[in-house]
Image (cartoon, helix red, strand yellow):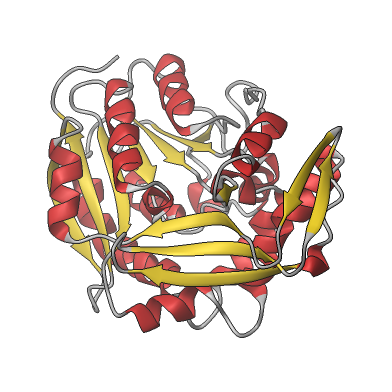
Amino acid sequence: MVNAGVLRAPPITPPVPLREVVLAGLRQRPKRLPSSFFYDDEGSRLFRRIMELPGYYLSRAELEILTTAAPRLAGAFAGRSLVVADLGAGDGSKTRVLLQALAGVCPELCYAPIDISMGALDELGRQRGPELSGVELDPLVMTFEAGLREVGLRHPGHTRLGLLLGSNIGNFTHSEALLLLAELHRALRSGDHLLIGFDLLKDPELLQRAYADDEGVTAAFNLNLLARMNRELGADFDAGAFRHFARYDPGKQAMESFLLSTRDQLVRIGPECIGFSAWEAMQTEISCKYRETDVLYLARNSGFTPVGWYYDGQRRFLDVLLRADSPGR
């Protein structure tokens, strides 16, 4: 087994067509930016601050679930050589709880954090504690689907456990989430699993506090998208001319975040020029909320079987263990 902190192979970094994706989104009506681009190094740092905010219950609820359920989850993989593919790993703080439990029952255990932010993966490696010294580390800077496939190629003799924690699934509309899960299923073999976090439908006032904090950290996280485009695309966004706005849409069962242009303005992105009207909205995030029936629908229609349901004490959040029963790739 490879010692902790030693990469099995160099991370693979696919080209991220940021300019093309941004321009395509800004030409839509309404304008949109993909939430996946939140997580550059500064965005990852700000999100760690968001997780500590009093109103942001999601991370604490899921940490409670993993702390309580880790022994049962580990028992499902006892005796297997296992690779844990952490999709959108961030700093991996919650995953460590599960890895500790798995390390005690799996003869070979590899942790493959997959993220589009190299800075987040570097931070994860720095925070790695001695309790995981026997776990092989194989980080990948890739998209979810590509990373899950690559992990299978690198570790052909291991069962795969994919993690999609932190309500990352919520950043996709319900139809997009179904397509994503179907794609992940195709990347797996029969007997592989996914553990997915779902933020459950609840009082909109609780949701509002989670996505529009008084301290302004979420606003800074949202506005960091403009700073990233200025830095990486040669854009000239004036962050002071935009305002963070979040709302709950009961029809979509989703929290939505926007940047509002506070005046008429033109923004240059390289040679392109994009016009904004006063108070025009640019959507930057959708965070869908789920009922148990929604989760069942997604699982069954993407090829998975739910085999474990885990809740926090207040039933605000749900982690579901899904098994891939038919062969993928």
Where in the figure is residue 276, as x and y percent of width and height?
A: 72, 55
User: In terms of depth relative to the viewer, which is nearer, 101 or 84?
Assistant: 84
The residue drawn where x is 84% and y is 60% is 238
Residue 180 image offset from top left, x and y in percent: 35, 34
Q: Toward which corner of the image does residue 199 lie, by quadrant?
A: bottom left
Which is nearer the eye, 229 or 148?
A: 229
Indicate whether 159 appears above or below 105. above
Residue 14, image x and y in percent? 63, 22
Above or below — where is 236 with respect to 27?
below
Residue 275: x %, y % from top left: 75, 49
Residue 138 falls left or right of residue 304: right
Asked if residue 246 is positioned above or below residue 47 in the image, the reply reads below
Q: Is residue 7 visible?
A: yes
- Quarter assignment of residue 5: top right
Residue 58 horizontal side relative to residue 268, left or right: left
Q: Nearer the viewer, residue 324 or 98?
A: 324
- Quadrant assignment for the C terminus: top left
In this figure, what is the number of numbered marks? 0
* Residue found at x 65% / y 29%: 16
**Who's the residue at 75% across and 54% down the image?**
226
Q: Is residue 142 above or below residue 220?
A: above
The residue located at (31%, 33%) in the rendering is 179
The answer to whether any part of residue 81 appears in the image is no
User: Left or right: where does residue 202 sit relative to residue 27?
Assistant: left
